[in-house]
Each structure stands twice: as C-alpha cells, then as structure tokens.
Image: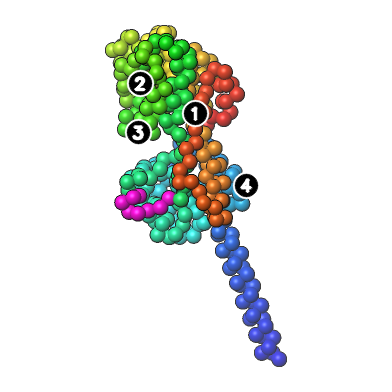
Amino acid sequence: MKKVWRSMAFAAAGASFFAMAAASASADDKVLGVALPNLTNPYYVAMKKSFEENGKAQDFTVRVMIADNDDAKQLSQIQTLVQQGVAAVALNCVSSGPCVASVSELNQAKIPVFTINLLPDPAGLKAENLKVEQAVQTDQKAGGTFVGQQLLKDIGADGKAVIGIVGEPTSVSANTRDDGFKEALSSNPNVKFVALVNGKVEETTALKVTTEMLQGNPEITVVYSDTEPAALGAMAAIQQLGRDDVKLYAFVDKLGVQYIEDNSILKAGAIQEPAKLAQIQVENIKKFLAGEKLEAIIDSPPLLVNKDNAGATVDKAY
C-alpha cells in the first residue's frame, strides 16, 4: 500500500512539474525581445516606451536591450535573447552591415526577427540567405515629398525659389528624403537647386556649413535640411547672418515643431513617429505568432507639420 501511495505521490509531483514547465514555456512564448541602438536620442526613448506599452497591451513581456551605438554589443545582446529563448525579436540595427550577423543568429535559433527603422543590409541578407519576417520603417521619400509640396504651395505653382540643401550624403535615408523633396518641386521650372552641403546631422557642423553656403550663394532663398539637428544649425546660421529673406524647410522633431508654430524662419517640416512604428510592429508580431501572413515591408508615412497644425502636433513629436 505504501508503494502505491509513493507511486501516486511521484506521479502527482511529476504532473505538477510538467504543469509548471508548460506554464513556464507558455510564459516564455510571450516574451518579446527588443534591440535598440541607444537612449541618448529622444527618438529611441519614444520607441522604447511604445514597445513596452503596446507589448503589455498585446500580452507580451518585453525585454529591451540598449546597444549604446556599439555593433558588437548589439550582437552580444541578440545572443543573450537567443539563449533566453524569446518568442520573437524586434531589431533596430546600430549599423546596417554588421546587423546582418544579428539576423543570422536569430535565424539559426529559429527565432522570428522583425526589423524596424534602421534595417540590415539587404545585400548582406541575400548573400547569406537570411530571413526577416517583416520590416517596419518610415517612408522617407514620402516625408521629403510632403515638405516639397508644402514649399510649392507656399511659393505658388509658378513661384521662384533658389534652394540650398543641408544634407547627409552618406545616409541612404537622408538621400531618399532629398529625392522626394526634389521630385515634388520638379513641376516648377522656377525652382533651382544651387548647393548641397554636409551637415553631418550635427547642429554645430550645420551652422558652419550653412553659413558658408549662404555666403557663397547669396541668391539662396530657401534652405532645406533633411535632419533636425542640421535644421537647428541652419536656422542659427540664417539668424546670425540676418537673412530674413531665407526660409527653412526640414525634417524635425519636437523642438522643430515648436519653431514651425512660431513660423518665422522654419516654415514647415515632416516628423517621424517612432511610437507609431513600434505599435505597428508589436501588433504585427502578435498576428504573426497567431499564424497570420504579413507583408514583407511596411512604409509608414511621416506627418507633415505646417503653421496650421503645429500647435496640435507638438505632443505627437518625440
């Protein structure tokens, strides 16, 4: 009789153990890993908060890894998430090329990977036959197009504008923004582009190069910047030179939206919405894990900001 009770006790303990293991596995299935480059940029602070809030709303436990702009550190963090057996990973690359290694780690572990904002190098993915379930990104070209269309509206269909660009020629995203801006203005033969300088996404650098650009091209009436830090430097250059005849159009964030609301120099811009990107990704990861098929890429258009909506838009900016 004792043997029977002992056997029943072991059976009960075994059942309890396997129930706990199943519960643990079920809990692990709901863990979403998130890999972000840094938290020094307000863009990623907003994205992190959105991942956490939307992850909770979708019943995920969210584990966020911050790489401090270090490719090797991000790869190590991905390896940690692999070891933890997370259900999926949302990956915002530090750099596109090195990020391919992170995708490889996840593919080998059969953990679905979803990329956001800065994506891994497509050629690198193809060369290694790697798979990303879905990429969510801002439609950079649409942002440039929106800003160009606003400028066209401001000057009129046949109005004149001589434009200098404060860009970042080494950035694919920035160049794509510039392409959209130029194409939106191509219908007006009175719009001319006369200069392109590298603001390096830095306020101090943009101040210097914009000053030099305006001094060397006094005919410029419009400055376009494809990043907010450069836009702030460009605005300072316009102010310091006393060029009240020069207007600024740019990609912006919260401070830029405030300047657009003032509408003295900075007339209009486009803002990215990192919180929206994260929300889209979390919702789609939930759908994927439930067995739904996803589109390969989602391009989320940025938001045009002008004097009419700046006041209502400032709280949406990061």
Residue marked by disc 3: 171
Q: Quadrant of residue 280?
A: top right
Of the numbered discs 2 and 1, the one sitting upstream in the chain is 2
Of the numbered discs 1 and 4, the one sitting upstream in the chain is 4
Q: Which residues are magenta?
A: 125-132
Looking at the rendered structure, the secondary structure element under dot 1 is strand
Within 10 Å of disc 2 (Cα), the crowding (few <14, some 14-19, many 20+) is many
- Three-letter amino acid code at the position of disc 3: Ser
Q: Residue at point 37% right, 27% down?
A: 179
Of the numbered discs 2 and 3, the one sitting upstream in the chain is 2
Residue marked by disc 2: 165
Q: CA distance from mark 3 to mark 4?
A: 35 Å
Q: CA distance from mark 2 to mark 4?
A: 42 Å
Residue marked by disc 4: 57
**Residue contact between numbered discs 2 and 4, judged by CB atoms under 8 Å:** no
The disc label shown at residue 271, or none? 1
- Three-letter amino acid code at the position of disc 2: Ile
Q: Position of residue 187 (x, y in %)?
A: 39, 18
